[in-house]
Image: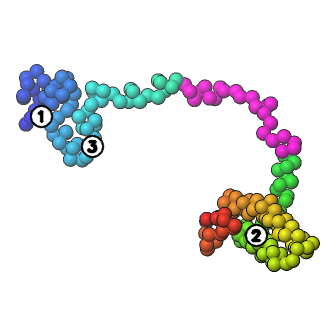
């Protein structure tokens, strides 16, 4: 009954649109609103809000972006002077590709990286050597053993420690999760 034209207001064909939009000629009825709500339609559609604010006009990207598609079609870019890889770089890349790097078994490589670079702990060996030299009488043998112990410590500091640090760095860069069962520790450096 509420949707009967001119019933609630003798000048308005559709009472609801007259109230909402101040335009009684828009076909907006109570029955249609109820039905749309029951069908879970959006409020914009249900209340025919395009009569108040037309989203389509504001979402017209052509109007705002112009004719960007044609601009891209007409775009002419010259890349004649760009060198992505010079001859030296190309040769280096070819040398690298034929180096056999693709045949390396990285799991075996990483397992070897986890091993200490020497079979003997050089610091313990140097300390033991010096302790034994201390029990010798003064002389050239005692001096020679002490000198050798110091040389071994120098080798350890200058070669073994940097090698172990390098191994830790390499393992961290190339280490794959799940390839080892326990953390690796080398002279105080940890491979987690």
Residue 102 in view in this figure = no
Helix, strand or loop at disc 3? loop
Which numbered marker is on residue 3?
Answer: 1
Q: Is residue 50 above or below residue 87?
A: above
Scheme of colours in the image: rainbow
In this rendering, position of residue 123 left or right of residue 190: right
Callout 2 crowding tier (Cα within 10 Å): few <14, some 14–19, many ≥20? some
- Identify the secondary structure beneath mark 2: helix
User: Would residue 78 be visible to someone looking at this image?
Assistant: yes
Q: Which of marks 3 and 2 is nearer the N terminus?
A: 3
Task: Please state the horizontal and vertical placement of residue 141, each as a whole percent of the image.
Answer: 91, 74
Q: Residue at x 92, y 72 (%)?
A: 140
Query: Between residues 159 and 126, which one lies in front from this camera angle?
Result: 126
- Residue 40 place in picture, x, y as percent: 25, 46
Closest to the observer: 55 or 160? Answer: 160
Identify the magenta region: 67-89
Callout 3 environment at 10 Å: few (<14), some (14 to 19), or many (20+)? few
Magenta residue check for 60: no
Residue that numbered label 2 is attached to: 123
Residue occupied by mark 3: 41
Q: Distance between the residues labelled 2 and 1?
A: 100 Å
Magenta span has 84?
A: yes
Q: Residue at x 59, y 27 (%)?
A: 70
Res 163 → quadrant: bottom right
Label 2 near label 3: C-beta < 8 Å?
no
């Amino acid at each position: 009954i509420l949707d009967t034209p001119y019933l609630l207001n003798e000048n308005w064909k559709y009472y609801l649109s007259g109230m909402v939009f101040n335009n009684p000629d828009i076909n907006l009825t109570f029955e249609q609103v109820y039905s749309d709500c029951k069908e879970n339609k959006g409020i914009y559609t249900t209340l025919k809000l395009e009569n108040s604010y037309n989203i389509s006009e504001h979402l017209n990207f052509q109007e705002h972006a112009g004719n960007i598609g044609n601009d891209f079609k007409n775009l002419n870019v010259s890349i004649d002077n760009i060198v992505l890889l010079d001859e030296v770089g190309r040769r280096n890349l070819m040398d690298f590709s034929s180096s056999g790097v693709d045949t390396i078994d990285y799991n075996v490589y990483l397992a070897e990286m986890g091993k200490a670079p020497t079979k003997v702990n050089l610091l313990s060996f140097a300390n033991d050597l010096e302790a034994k030299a201390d029990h010798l009488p003064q002389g050239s043998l005692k001096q020679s053993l002490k000198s050798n112990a110091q040389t071994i410590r120098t080798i350890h500091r200058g070669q073994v420690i940097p090698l172990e640090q390098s191994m830790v760095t390499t393992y961290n860069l190339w280490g794959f999760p799940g390839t080892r069962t326990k953390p690796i520790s080398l002279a105080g450096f940890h491979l987690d």
